[in-house]
Image (cartoon, rainbow, N blue to C red):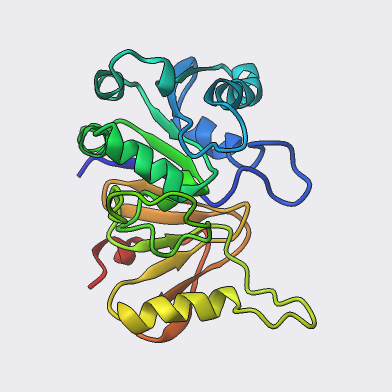
Amino acid sequence: MSRQLLLCSSSKAGDSAYLEPVIPHLQERLPNPCTLMFVPYAGVGMSYDDYTAKVAEALVPHGYQVKGLHNEADPQAAIANAAAILVGGGNTFHLLAQLQQLDLIEPIRAAVATGVPYIGWSAGSNIAGLTIRTTNDMPIVQPPSFDALALVPFQLNPHYSDYQPPGFHGETRDQRLAEFMAIEPNTPILAIREGTALKVDGETMTLLGASDGCVFKKGQKSALPCNTDISAWLSAK
């Protein structure tokens, strides 16, 4: 498989500027100049035009051009002809619902299978997994199905944190992911912390960044080491 994926946990890390954690990995993945087809459908709190402009403001100084998929007369053809696909964060349920309603799931899969780079962050990374059942987002809309792009054979949990504020009595992230494991014990969940990204080249995968992630499977939590070969999870059984 010739897939080229960059699945970032977040658009920011700490007090960073917008897309600051993404840009170095993007530059490594895509030489510039390059036109990115931006999928803004996870954006709910702003218009798609404003979201596209925000992303362009961050990326144009680095030699990239950004086109909003929502402005294309034929979104399926635009995906098929894209040099690279960029999918932003926001609400994962809204993003998936829009992709399904516009019949864009298969065109994106087909493009990635031919080697078109796919870059996502937050919700844009979440939908690269098998389903969106391990997203952190509120289901503000109901997509026809929770099945996602399945560009990788596992679940994703971006923005992962195991911090528990003192006096907090709600479920922790680990408890929520444990609930999924109770239902789907054999399906791995790769949880990645803010500022990190999964880089996939064909059958090779690395967690980029300075923080280890975690893998949840069969009721167990284990470390997902950064900057080492973690390709085994691309064929996880």
Please identify the quarter of the rendering in which residue 168 is found: bottom right
Left or right: 57, with 1 as reference point: right
Whether residue 7 appears in this view of the structure is no
Nearest the eye: 44 or 7:
44
Nearest the eye: 213 or 72:
72
Number of numbered callouts drawn: 0
Q: Position of residue 236 (x, y in %)?
A: 26, 69
Nearest the eye: 115 or 44:
44
Q: Residue furthest front?
A: 141
Say which residue appears at 55% left-offset and 23% top-offset.
52
Say which residue appears at 61% left-offset and 63% top-offset.
211
Whether residue 37 appears in this view of the structure is yes
| Above or below: residue 16 compared with residue 117 | below
Q: Position of residue 105 (x, y in %)?
A: 26, 39
- Quadrant placement of the C terminus: bottom left
- Quadrant placement of the N terminus: top left
Please identify the quarter of the rendering in which residue 63 is found: top right
Nearest the eye: 50 or 205:
50
| Above or below: residue 122 compared with residue 74 | below
Left or right: 206, with 49 as reference point: left
Say which residue appears at 36% left-offset and 43% top-offset.
97
Left or right: 28, with 83 as reference point: right
Please identify the quarter of the rendering in which residue 205 is found: bottom left
Q: Position of residue 189 (x, y in %)?
A: 40, 69
